Image: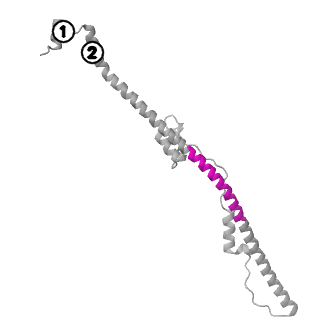
Amino acid sequence: MTPSQEVLDATGEGPTLQERAERLRAKVNAPNEAAAELARVERQIAEQTRGDLKAEAERRMLGIVRACGSFAANLEQDDLRLLAAARTYVEAMETLNARFEKLNLFKREAQALAEGFGLAMPELPLIVTPVQREAVDEARMMVAHVPVQQTGYLAEQREYDVKTQSYGARSYVELEGTEGAALLKRRA
């Protein structure tokens, strides 16, 4: 049977005070070492998570660059399609106006012949001016009232602190629904 530490201490066969102090310091420091190790591991996890998020953000940024290039090219095509549609609208309006003018001229010609030769005036279709025609007016109003984006302004949103009545960090609310907003939210 091994004698207890108290017996060893009493008989002088146990460790010296210095050795006991070292042993006790090791026991006291053991929990602190575990806490320190945990803190180091948690810092490494946080760094790894930040690194992973940054890599995702870099991939998203590349996607945005590519999308912007594609959308810019599409906008140029949209410009050309819009211009072609405007020309088609102008041609359609000019054709409509020319037909109306020709029909009106036929009506005046018939009236002049009836008057000049004493002929009976034939029954001709009722002529409604283009501006009074419902479909023409609707088309004209549609074209005239289509909004055109004038700026690319998108206001930055900031958190508001009621206590200090001041604005703080960006909230990125204006980006809600985008992949970038989701990444920024995960970063916080």
Q: In the rendering, at what x and y percent does residue 38 appear?
A: 36, 28
The extreme top residue here reads 12
Q: Secondary structure at mark 2?
A: helix
Q: In the rendering, at what x and y percent does residue 118 appear?
A: 85, 93
Q: Nearer the viewer, residue 145 or 74?
A: 74
Q: In the rendering, at what x and y percent does residue 121 appear?
A: 79, 91
Q: Quadrant of residue 10?
A: top left
Magenta run includes residue 84: yes
Q: Secondary structure at mark 1?
A: helix
- Give the left or right position of residue 155, taking residue 1 as reference: right
The extreme left residue here reads 1
Please, what is the three-letter code of the amino acid marked with disc 2? Leu
Indicate which disc residue 24 carries. Answer: 2
Q: Classify 55 as above or below 80.
A: above
Q: Quadrant of residue 94?
A: bottom right
Q: Residue at 25% across / 11% down in the picture?
A: 20
Q: Classify 155 as above or below 138.
A: above
Magenta stretch, overall SS:
helix
Position of the N terminus, as image quadrant, is: top left
Q: Which residues are magenta?
A: 61-86
The extreme front residue here reads 1
Q: Residue at 53% across / 43% down in the picture?
A: 59
Please, what is the three-letter code of the amino acid marked with disc 1? Asp
Q: Residue at 80% across / 93% down in the picture?
A: 120
Q: Residue at 69% across / 75% down in the picture?
A: 133
Q: Earlier in the sequence, mark 2 or mark 1?
A: 1
- Give the left or right position of residue 1, taking residue 146 as reference: left
Mark 2 touches mark 1? (CB < 8 Å): no
Mark 1 highlights which residue? 9
Q: Residues within 10 Å of mark 1 (few under 14, many from 20)?
A: some
